Amino acid sequence: MTTLFYIAAAVAVLATVLVITRANLVHALLYLVVSLFAVAVVFYTLGAPFVAALEVIVYAGAIMMLFVFAVMLLNVSADAPLRVPPSAWVGPLVLVAVLLAELVYGIGLTDHALHAGEVGPQQVSAALFGPYVLGVELASMLLLAALIGARHIASQPETPEIEGPRPAAAGSATRAGDGGEA
Amino acid sequence: MAAVSLDHGLILAAILFVIGFVGLLTRRNLIVALACIEIMLNAAGLAFVVAGARWGSPDGQVMFLFVLAMAAGEVAVGLALAIRFRQSLGRLDVDDADEMRG
């Protein structure tokens, strides 16, 4: 297990260095996903499988999806080619191959040395909704505030100079109203 | 399970945090700056989980969940700000937002 930890740690450090050195934004996000996967493997080797699953689902899934949607909304593809060239596949593929080899090796372990010091989801949930229940409520309020704030900040301003073709399409009043709301 | 020492886990968290901080200082793209903040938050959560694993306590994982929720809220607001930044200034260079002379 120590070997798995050190290999995953090396992958995490290498991928994170590549995140901050890539000039292409899409390549940097690609390496950031690899880095988050490597940290998830580190969590698993530390005996925290619940947090490792959440790292993959929430960080590499939801948060990176937000990043990719923002990149698409910002039309960064005008600056960089949208199709990733095959020469850019090599780095993430090698790093992910190391993580896959670790995963196969970890599944192949038949003894229960992997789960010797594990703190499972039951203990985490019992702590989360026991002494930390106030923190859960605060986190829910924080997420609601972030939802409303993000919707308010990202919404179109009411000034009509950006919406140039709006008066030309004033014949369809309902559709123009929907466009203003969206 | 005590094979991985506490020091090495914390050193890994420190390395990841410093890499994110260097990226935050050196890159000028707003999206990359947000990604570097994510790296730093992730490193802080890693330190919590390492410390929790050292004493076999679920508290570290609970704190990581709170860090996760905070990172999700932060990145939602940050990316909304990035979209408004691009719409009003036309670029994603953080040096363009110097009207306050900060």
Image (cartoon, coloured by chain):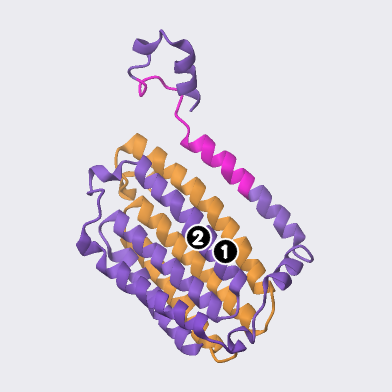
Residue B12 sits inside the magenta stretch? no
Q: CA distance from mark 1 to mark 2?
A: 7 Å
Mark 1 residue type: Leu
Residue appearing at x 53%, y 81% in the figure = A45
Residue B48 x, y percent position in the rendering: 59, 74
- Please give the letter of the chain rendered in purple: A
Colour applied to chain B: orange
According to the picture, the residue beneath numbered tag 1 turns out to be: A54
Mark 2 residue type: Tyr
Please tell me whether mark 2 sits on a helix, a strand or a loop: helix
Q: Residue furthest right?
A: A130
**A21 with respect to A153 (left or right):** left
Q: Check if mark 1's residue and mark 2's residue have beta carbons within 8 Å.
A: yes
Residue A156 sits inside the magenta stretch? yes
User: In the picture shown, does residue A142 fall above or below B36?
Assistant: above
10 Å crowding of disc 2: few (<14), some (14-19), many (20+)? many
User: In the picture shown, does residue A51 fall above or below A168?
Assistant: below
What span is colored magenta in the figure? A143-163
Asked which quadrant contains residue B85, the reply is top left
According to the picture, the residue beneath numbered tag 2 turns out to be: A59
Residue A93 x, y percent position in the rendering: 31, 69
Residue appearing at x 64%, y 81% in the figure = A118
**A6 with respect to B45 (left or right):** left
Chain on which label 1 sits: A
10 Å crowding of disc 1: few (<14), some (14-19), many (20+)? some
Residue appearing at x 37%, y 69% in the figure = A16
Chain on which label 2 sits: A
Q: How many marks?
A: 2
Image quadrant occupied by the N terminus of chain B: bottom right
Residue A90 x, y percent position in the rendering: 25, 68
Residue appearing at x 45%, y 27% in the figure = A157
